Amino acid sequence: MGDTFTKAERSRIMSLVRSKDTKPELVVRRLAHSLGFRYRLHRADLPGTPDLVFPSQRKVILVSGCFWHGHSCGRCRLPGTRRDYWVAKIERNRTRDRCTNAALRRAGWRVLVVWECHTKNRDRLTKRIAGFLRAE
């Protein structure tokens, strides 16, 4: 089955998909700030341009969307159209994520990945972020 939108309409829709300042990222930023931690955003000099960077601790937090990064939480499903494209696209994203995490760790950074679905439970997420940032 083909796409129900024209190429121009699909392009406009996809241009609205954000890569920075997403709702899950804003949730994580507010939590980290409320815990008293200060951070830098999207440092381009680090592999993968991490969402939150804590330079003095050499720690980063990556906020990943469940659909775009292929999380197995079951909250999202592949579109019915162009399934082959989406499977390949998400697998490329997952491969890139693994390479990015490995490069950050090799460079001496500790990495925490927060999935979009984890932002729904604020208490649990707060404990997880606090534990990660307070640990040596």
Image (cartoon, helix red, strand yellow):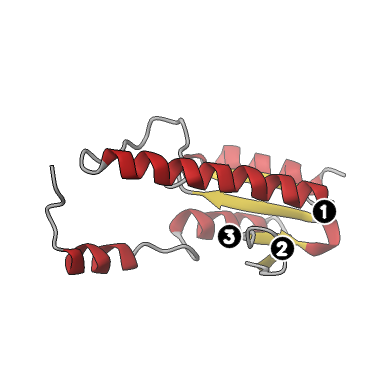
Q: Which residue is mark 2?
A: 46
Q: Amino acid at mark 3?
A: Arg
Where's the C terminus, which quadrant? top right
Quadrant (top left, top right, bottom left, bottom right) of the N terminus? top left
**Residue 49, picture quadrant:** bottom right
Q: Quadrant of residue 30?
A: bottom right
- Between tags 2 and 3, which lies in front? 2
Is there a contact, CB below 8 Å, between mark 3 and mark 1? no
The residue that mark 1 highlights is 107
Task: Choose between 61 and 2: the one closer to the eye.
Answer: 2
User: Mark 1 packing: few (<14 Cα in 10 Å), some, or many (20+)?
Assistant: few
- Tell me the SS state at disc 1: loop
For mark 2, give the secondary structure: loop
Real-space Cα separation, disc 2 to disc 3, in angstroms: 22 Å
Q: Position of residue 66 (x, y in %)?
A: 44, 42
Q: Which mark is residue 30?
A: 3
Reading the chain from its start, which is encountered first: label 2 or label 3? Answer: 3
Q: Position of residue 88 (x, y in %)?
A: 40, 42
Q: Whole-Å distance between the Cαs marked 2 and 1?
A: 9 Å
How far apart marks 3 and 1 lie (CA) works out to 27 Å
For the residues bearing labels 2 and 1, Cβ distance under 8 angstroms? yes
Dot 3 or dot 1: first in sequence order is 3
